[in-house]
Amino acid sequence: MNNLNFINSSTDQNNSHVVIFQQDVFTPGGLTVAWRVVSLETGDCAKIPVSDDAEFYVSVANPEIVVNDGLMTIKEFSTPVVSMKGGQIARVAGDSASGYMITVE
């Protein structure tokens, strides 16, 4: 067993949501599905136990919810998806105004 490690180094005052995707080996063509969502406040760290040989894809998603005249609109700001394996660290940086960035070490 190993861990996927996440650190929120963003300057945003809102929570950052890291979406973890994994390829479903049981469906034809290996559909990629959202496996887990991790919410991190600035400065938070999270460790998620995973098998050593599993590969994941991660992205930051930070939805903005706007209500105008009773109509709710959800705008989502996200980073490109990056590949990650157990034992690596994903670091979230930036903010909703200038954009988020996720790097894997």
Image (cartoon, grey):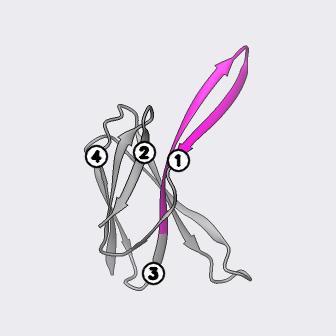
Query: Marks 1/4: CA distance?
Result: 16 Å
Q: Is residue 44 left or right of residue 23?
A: left
Q: Which mark is residue 9?
A: 4
Residue shown at 49% from the left, 51% from the top: 79
Residue shown at 48% from the left, 72% from the top: 56
Amino acid type of disc 3? Answer: Ala
Q: Which mark is residue 100?
A: 2
Contact (Cβ within 8 Å) of mark 1 with mark 3: no
From this view, report whether residue 61 is shown above or below residue 74. Answer: below
Q: Residue furthest bottom?
A: 53
From this view, report whether residue 42 is shown above or below residue 87. Answer: above
Question: Along the polypeptide, which appears first: circle 4 or circle 2?
Answer: 4
From this view, report whether residue 57 is shown above or below residue 99. Answer: below
SS class, disc 4: loop
Query: Marks 3/4: CA distance?
Result: 25 Å
Are there few (<14), some (14-19), or many (20+) residues within 10 Å of tag 2? many
Magenta region: 57-77
Residue of label 1 = 78
Q: Can residue 62 be found in the magenta stretch?
A: yes
Question: Along the polypeptide, which appears first: circle 1 or circle 4?
Answer: 4
Amino acid type of disc 1? Answer: Ser
Q: Which mark is residue 54?
A: 3
Contact (Cβ within 8 Å) of mark 3 with mark 2: no
SS class, disc 3: loop
Are there few (<14), some (14-19), or many (20+) residues within 10 Å of tag 3? few
Of marks 1 and 3, the one in the foreground:
1
